[in-house]
Amino acid sequence: MAEYSQTGILTALLLFTVVTVRDIYVGRSSMTQQDSTGPDLHTQRQNKHTFYTGPVLKFQYCKVFQEYSRSINQLYPDIRIEGENYPPKPINKYIGNFISYFKLLAIALIVTGQNPFQMFGMNTPRIWSWGQENKIFSCLMAFFLSNMLETHFLSTGAFEISLNDVPVWSKLQSGYVPSIQELFQVLDNHLKMNQVDKMNFPSP
């Protein structure tokens, strides 16, 4: 087998480490920032509602959000549209974080040549010996397989829609994303119901 230079291996380790640490801590810092600024965001939204009296359509979305938002803005210009990522289940989030740390540890062990199985008095598997002989390829394989597993646990496939905090559509319950015509019909029905409610219950 061809031997790789130490500089190339260290460069690969540095690249994988930077990308992995960025995925772990950037995602965590953004989630922490959202949690820490939650009351402030809630206050800001309340302040916005005091100036904006129209309906608010909220998407927890997949990739069709931008396409649908443009179409809705053309037909309903008075609706303010908000979008955000639908959060995964807590257990899936913890599993995704564990995979991120495990990926970093596995790549570090491969590059440094440490054998964790000998530390625990276990026989070294053939795949680990093969990985030591093909460090760059095994690092790439560990990196991409771990990312695939992270995506599997952290993706929700959700397309949740609420109008003034009232759910009007859920892909998680219905099992599919509505067509734009179907979404227009749902919005039209809910907007008409809101108008009827305002007429029947006028504000003092």
Image: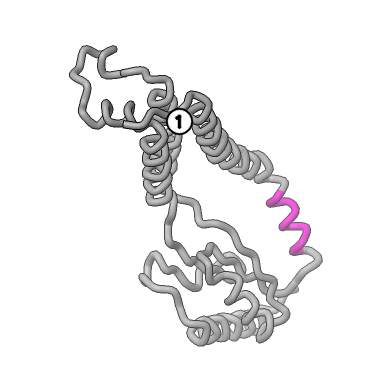
Residue found 55% across the figure and 39% down from its top:
19
Q: Residue furthest right?
A: 51
Q: In this view, does 35 lie to the left or right of 53?
A: left
Query: 42 or 171, which is in the foreground?
Result: 171
> From the image, which quarter does the C terminus lie in?
bottom right
Range drawn in magenta = 41-49
Left or right position of 116 against 38:
left
In depth, the one of 197 and 187 nearer the eye is 187
From what the image shows, is residue 181 above or below residue 88? below
Residue visible at 61% across and 41% down?
A: 35
Q: Does the magenta stretch include residue 48?
A: yes
Q: Residue 146: percent from the left, percent from the top?
A: 39, 41
Residue at the image point whose x is 36% and y is 31% from the top: 2
Residue 12: give x, y in percent of width and height: 50, 33
Image position of 188 with respect to 121: above or below: below
Is residue 195 shown above or below 18? below
Which element is circle 1 on? helix
Residue 79 sits in which quadrant? bottom right
Residue 177 spot, x, y in % from top left: 44, 74
Quarter-wise, where is residue 111 in the image? top left
Query: Does the segment drawn in magenta span residue 193?
Result: no
Q: Is residue 97 left or right of 44 when viewed as pictured?
A: left
* Viewport quadrant of the N terminus: top left
Image height of 51 relative to 67, above or below: above
Could you tell me the amino acid type at mark 1? Leu
Q: Residues within 10 Å of mark 1 (few under 14, many from 20)?
A: many
Q: Name the residue under label 1.
A: 104
Q: Report the residue that reaches farthest toward the left.
A: 123
- On the image, the x and y values in percent for residue 81 come to 66, 70
Q: Main SS of the magenta segment?
A: helix
Q: Residue at x 64, y 83 (%)?
A: 195
